Image (cartoon, rainbow, N blue to C red):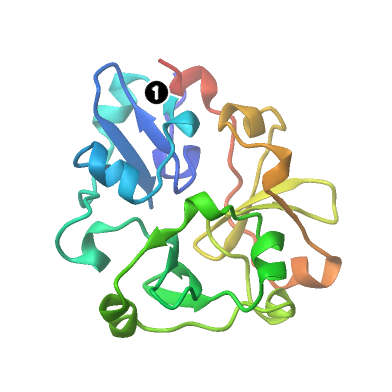
Amino acid sequence: MTKVNMSSALPDGILVRGSDSSVYLIERGTKRPIADPESLYHYKLSLKHMIRIEDGFLNGMVNGEMIRRCGDYVRHSPSTLLVRGGDSAVYVWMGGRLFPIATSGMFRRLCYQAHQLVNLPDSLIASLPIGELIDDSFFMSHPAIDGRLYSGPDGFIYYGEQRKLRKLEVPSLFSYFRWDVGQLIYFTSEEFANSPIGEPIADFRSTLSA
């Protein structure tokens, strides 16, 4: 059997489970256990996008920090989220910073939905570092946003992870990860050139599936 590099086989932000009821969020090659159903609901993590993988591979992955709604937000939240404060300002939480989304048009271009918004107290919002404003020209000078799907000018589909674009090597991986075309952000050639290319997402389904 081909040795699988789990950190590259599964993209960040994917929910997985094995043969038992435990659910994990994949981030940076680790599996982060979801503490309870309340935490799953609080962070708007959808089980409809969860995939099952073979227990041997799941057990071989390093455990990351638990995902839970209580306690230190930076430590226990997913690394990428869509969040909102009490003043209705909307941010992408990514890489330990809050990136404000400038307009409703940009919100739509990023293919976010209102039901994905995680409400945070204003006191917490005020305590977190602020990143660059995500406006209409953001991608002309900044790399890809994590956890988003992109259609490149070369005709391939990419996934944003750690501010890099990871190409799907096999088109059928798109449905395997339960993504849909309504999530695609269409990059111009100029925007595409501003995002470094990361390691491709290879087709390891024959060894990952339960």
Dot 1 falls on a residue whose secondary structure is: loop
Q: Note whether residue 31 is visible.
A: no
Amino acid type of disc 1?
Answer: Ile
74 displayed left or right of 29: left
Q: Position of residue 201 (x, y in %)?
A: 58, 41
Residue at the extreme left: 71
Residue at the image position 27 percent from the left and 76 percent from the top: 124
Residue that appears at 32% across and 80% down: 128
On-image quarter of the N terminus: top left
Q: Is residue 96 above or below residue 153?
A: below
Q: Identify the image quadrant of residue 95.
A: bottom left
Vertical order, 192 against 49 (above or below): below
Q: Quadrant of residue 59?
A: top left
Measured as percent of width and height from the top left, residue 207 is found at: 46, 20
Q: Quadrant where the C terminus lies?
A: top left
Image coordinates of residue 16 in percent, x first then y, are 38, 32
Please tell me how many numbered marks the rendered image carries. Answer: 1
**Which residue is identified by label 1?**
53
Q: Can residue 200 be seen?
A: yes
